[in-house]
Image (cartoon, rainbow, N blue to C red):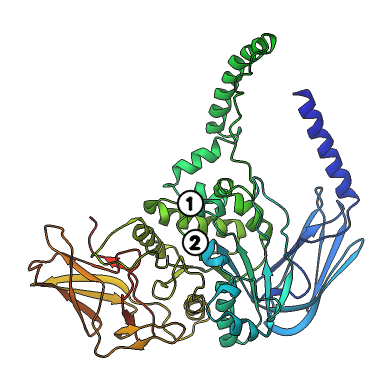
């Protein structure tokens, strides 16, 4: 115990000495070629010698701060106007740092696992997309994948100007999302690719997120068990100490008898974060500590998110999504910024039985319920994106997420969502379903990257209906105004309807006239 304390004291002293002699420095989220967020206060922060005065200059503004005892300092620039003219951000203390070619526009964070990670070079028509990716006012920051058991101060990565030479390995979802905004808004766009393939929702959550959501009791208790300052942690550590007291004489006796040592009781702790260990990257908050926390409180417009099946049970998906978004928002301190997400795409063979209702469908349903989160939005992509494909249509996914931003953040008079189930009523042998965001319902056909085409003589597919026996039957469905009327000769007294209720609802073809697909839904709770 004494030796452990001595090591900690030495580390503390060494840290203090190294800080005292440190030059002014900033985290790597700042750099040449970056974009600063417009129309919001802009935090600029870093480290210097304790008590050192730091002056920050940008766009005719000058702010100053004094480094605290731990060397940390921060200023907040007043809200800036969009500007695609390159400027310099200067930070001066004992030394001077000058970041060049800095623009002012909108900054978006793209995070999650494969849906967010999938690179431009693996998207459909990648060669042409890469060749045409010449957007000097779009800037890209790819955060190196890194997990940690404790909050890191900095990331690895640097800003790049969007070009055919830089876009290749960048998140395709982020790029196509940002490209749409850049074309429509004519302002600089900064994109931060903060994704990690195979990662878990729980690993991206801030510890605050588990505290904020009552339904997340199990992970909250587990995290508390690692902290000896909590009541749960005290109980956990007391239990281990008692085990150690029993183990110690057994270990001493084994040593004297030259026998194998009995297993040593371990203190309550998370799995050690290792980026070469698939299990450890799913530990609570490790991606947050390693990749998100070092970015906070960099000013940004909002978040787009794409996450697969990892890290939550189906019934808990909406609770984890709430914990994720609310935890990030609390940590950032920038209010309820937009949180737009992609619905799980198709997977597996096309569904042939009505309403398979498997776990993938349940995960989708949890995501759809997440639309109750304030300032959230959802892009439906099962008609264009296959979870297992070698190349993927990320263009439509990025475009559909961008529609939410254009409509909600920038007040463009456009349709931004596909039809969402609103209500239903039974009339005789039929169920009449009403939708929000109907915008003129139509039967659509989507092929590759081409726009959705209306099929005037087509048939609606993937509607199923059931009666009191709860046996699902494929149903006839037809559009009547802004409703869909569903019936089946096999179900004379229907009570419930489902649509696209399988892992791969290939052929599901209900759209609105904006070319946006209807989200899966069910009217029952069986």
User: Would you name the residue on which mark 2 appears?
Assistant: 307
Lateral position of residue 206 relative to residue 322, left or right: right
Q: Residue at x 69, y 83 (%)?
A: 137
Specify the quadrant of the image occupied by residue 157: bottom right
For the N terminus, the image quarter is top right
Which residue occupies the foreground of this view, 424 or 69?
424
Disc 1 designates what residue?
311
- x, y percentage for residue 393? 49, 76
Mark 1 Cα-neighbour bin, 10 Å: few <14, some 14–19, many ≥20 = many
Report whether residue 85 is seen. yes
Q: Quadrant of residue 434?
A: bottom left
Residue located 29% across and 59% down the image: 357
Q: Quadrant of residue 429?
A: bottom left
Disc 2, disc 1: CB below 8 Å?
A: yes
Q: Nearer the viewer, residue 514 or 73?
A: 514
Q: Secondary structure at mark 1?
A: loop
In the rendered image, the vertical position of residue 156 relative to residue 79, given as above or below: above
Image x and y of residue 313, in percent? 41, 50
Q: Give the x, y percent position of residue 94.
A: 92, 60
Residue 212 place in picture, x, y as percent:
49, 50
Q: Answer above or below: position of 245 versus 214.
A: above
């Amino acid at each position: 115990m004494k030796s452990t304390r001595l090591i900690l004291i030495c580390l503390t002293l060494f840290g203090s000495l190294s800080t005292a002699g440190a030059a002014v420095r900033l985290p790597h989220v700042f750099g040449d070629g970056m974009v600063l967020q417009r129309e919001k206060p802009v935090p600029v922060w870093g480290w210097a010698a304790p008590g050192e005065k730091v002056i920050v200059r940008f766009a005719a503004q000058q702010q100053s701060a004094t480094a605290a005892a731990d060397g940390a300092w921060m200023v907040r620039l007043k809200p800036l106007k969009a500007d695609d003219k390159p400027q310099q951000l200067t930070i001066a203390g004992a030394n001077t740092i000058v970041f060049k070619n800095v623009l002012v526009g909108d900054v978006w964070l793209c995070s999650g696992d494969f849906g967010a990670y999938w690179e431009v070079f693996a998207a459909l028509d990648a060669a042409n997309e890469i060749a045409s990716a010449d957007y000097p006012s779009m800037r890209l920051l790819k955060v190196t994948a890194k997990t940690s058991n404790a909050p890191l101060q900095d990331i690895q990565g640097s800003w790049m100007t969007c070009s055919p030479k830089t876009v290749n390995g960048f998140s395709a979802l982020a790029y196509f999302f940002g490209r749409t905004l850049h074309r429509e808004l004519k302002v600089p766009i900064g994109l931060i690719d903060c994704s990690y393939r195979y990662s878990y929702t729980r690993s991206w959550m801030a510890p605050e997120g588990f505290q904020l959501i009552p339904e997340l009791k199990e992970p909250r208790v587990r995290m508390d068990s690692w902290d000896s300052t909590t009541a749960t942690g005290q109980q956990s550590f007391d239990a281990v100490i008692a085990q150690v007291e029993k183990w110690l004489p057994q270990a001493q006796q084994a040593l004297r008898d030259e026998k194998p040592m009995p297993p040593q009781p371990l203190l309550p702790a998370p799995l050690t974060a290792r980026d070469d260990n698939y299990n450890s990257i799913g530990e609570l908050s490790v991606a947050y500590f390693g990749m998100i926390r070092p970015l906070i409180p960099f000013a940004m417009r909002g978040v787009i998110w794409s996450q697969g099946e990892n890290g939550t049970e189906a019934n808990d998906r909406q609770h984890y999504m709430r914990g994720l978004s609310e935890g990030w928002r609390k940590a950032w301190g920038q209010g309820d910024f937009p949180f737009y997400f992609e619905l799980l795409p198709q997977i597996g063979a096309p569904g042939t039985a009505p309403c398979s209702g498997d776990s993938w469908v349940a995960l989708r349903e949890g995501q759809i319920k997440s639309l109750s989160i304030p300032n959230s939005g959802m892009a439906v992509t099962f008609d264009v994106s296959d979870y297992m494909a070698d190349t993927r249509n990320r263009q439509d996914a990025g475009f559909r997420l961008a529609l939410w931003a254009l409509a909600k953040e920038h007040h463009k008079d456009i349709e931004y969502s596909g039809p969402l189930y609103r209500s239903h009523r039974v009339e005789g042998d039929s169920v009449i379903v009403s939708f929000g965001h109907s915008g003129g319902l139509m039967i659509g056909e989507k092929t590759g990257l081409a726009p959705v085409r209306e099929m005037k003589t087509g048939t609606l597919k993937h509607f199923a209906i059931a009666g009191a026996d709860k046996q699902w039957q494929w149903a006839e469905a037809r559009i009547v105004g802004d409703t869909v009327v569903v019936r089946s000769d096999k179900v004379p007294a229907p009570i419930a309807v489902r649509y696209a209720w399988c892992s791969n609802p290939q052929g599901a073809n209900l759209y609105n006239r904006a070319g946006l697909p209807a989200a899966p839904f069910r009217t029952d709770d069986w």
